[in-house]
Every structure is written in structure tokens, then in C-alpha cells.
Image (cartoon, rainbow, N blue to C red):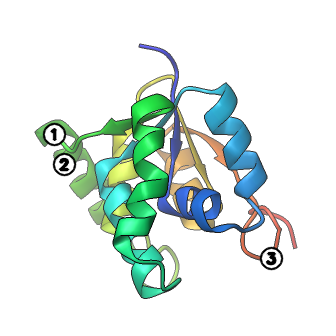
Amino acid sequence: MAQLTLLDAYALIAFAAGGPAQGEVRGLLREQHCGAATANLIEVLDVAKRVRGVQIGRAREVIEPLLADTLTAIPLDLDRAWRAARLRADHYDRRTCPVSLADCVLVASAGEDDRVATSDSHVLEVSSREGVRTLPLPDERGQRAGQN
């Protein structure tokens, strides 16, 4: 299987609703093999509705064509579930590393040659600790993790 760039929910929301990472994510979707854990697709719809006020149907209209063409949905099977549970148990700390379960599913979904694209410094840190390659994306302020 080809190397995948796994996009977290933030990346897909930036693509769909705008934000500093929108252009970069659009380029990744155009030029790379991209994937998203199904847990992150749930998070996209949730955040689109709760935080951005975008109706779930509208968010699906933007995301579903990607799934038909350029974005591989990675289902949560038992192996990934066990790995995600271990990641959460090993790395989660409410104050210093508040990685969500969906974040852990994302990292657990990465194969040996894959990389995780996110602006979340905690996801980048957990990925790095687990030997998963990363691609830092600009956050809402246009900065990448590690920049001030």
C-alpha cells in the first residue's frame, strides 16, 4: 500500500471551512495519498456543527466527494482500537498532553510509512514518541508547532 498522509479533524475542517491550513491541505489532497481515521471524520462533523455552526449535511457534502476521490477512510478495527487504547493510557495527561481518543485513533491508524498531518502539538509529540512521521500544519494563528 502507498504511503498515506493521515489528516486529523483540524486539517479537514480547515479544508472545508477555511483557515490557515486550507491551502496546504488542499495541496495534500491534490498531490498525495491521504487518509483519515473514521474517528476523525466523526470529529469533523461534530466540530463543524458545534463550533462552526455548519450543518452536518453541509459538512458531509464537502467531505464525501473527497472520500470518493482522494481520501481513504481508515476504519477502526480491533488492532487499531487496542493500539489507540494503549496510546491514550501511555501518553494522556490532562494538563501536559490532553490527546483525545480520536487523536489516539489517528496515530494508531498510521502504518509504518505513513505520516500524520496536524497542527496539534500534542498529537505531533505522541506521534514522534511512537515513531510515526509527522507533517506540522499551521494552526489558527498561522503558526506551526514549535514556532512562537
Q: Who is closer to the viewer here, 67 or 86?
A: 67
Query: Seen from this angle, which residue lies furthest top?
Result: 1
Question: For this view, does 67 lie left or right of residue 10?
Answer: left
Indicate the position of residue 26 as horizontal and vertical percent values: 69, 44
Few, some or many C-alpha atoms within 10 Å of disc 3 (few <14, some 14-19, many ≥20)?
Answer: few
Indicate the position of residue 69 as horizontal and vertical percent values: 47, 30
Task: Evaluate if marks 1 and 3 touch, with contact meaning CB atoms under 8 Å apart.
Answer: no
Task: Evaluate if marks 2 and 3 touch, with contact meaning CB atoms under 8 Å apart.
Answer: no
Residue highlighted by disc 1: 77
Looking at marks 2 and 3 on the same chain, the residue that comes earlier in the sequence is marked by 2
Task: Evaluate if marks 1 and 2 touch, with contact meaning CB atoms under 8 Å apart.
Answer: yes
Type of residue at label 1? Asp
Q: Is residue 93 visible?
A: no
Residue highlighted by disc 3: 141
Few, some or many C-alpha atoms within 10 Å of disc 2 (few <14, some 14-19, many ≥20)?
Answer: some
Q: Is residue 41 above or below residue 71?
A: below
Type of residue at label 2? Ala
Indicate the position of residue 88 as horizontal and vertical percent values: 31, 63
Residue highlighted by disc 2: 81
Q: Hey, which quadrant is residue 135 in on the image?
A: top right
Q: Which residue lies at the image location 49% right of the left edge and 15% below the top edge?
A: 2
Quadrant housing the C terminus = bottom right
Q: Who is closer to the viewer here, 106 or 112?
A: 106
- Report helix, strand or loop for mark 2: helix
- Report helix, strand or loop for mark 3: loop
Whole-number angstrom distance, CA of label 2 to CA of label 3: 33 Å
Whole-number angstrom distance, CA of label 1 to CA of label 3: 35 Å
Q: Hey, which quadrant is residue 133 in on the image?
A: top right
Q: Who is closer to the viewer here, 136 or 50?
A: 50
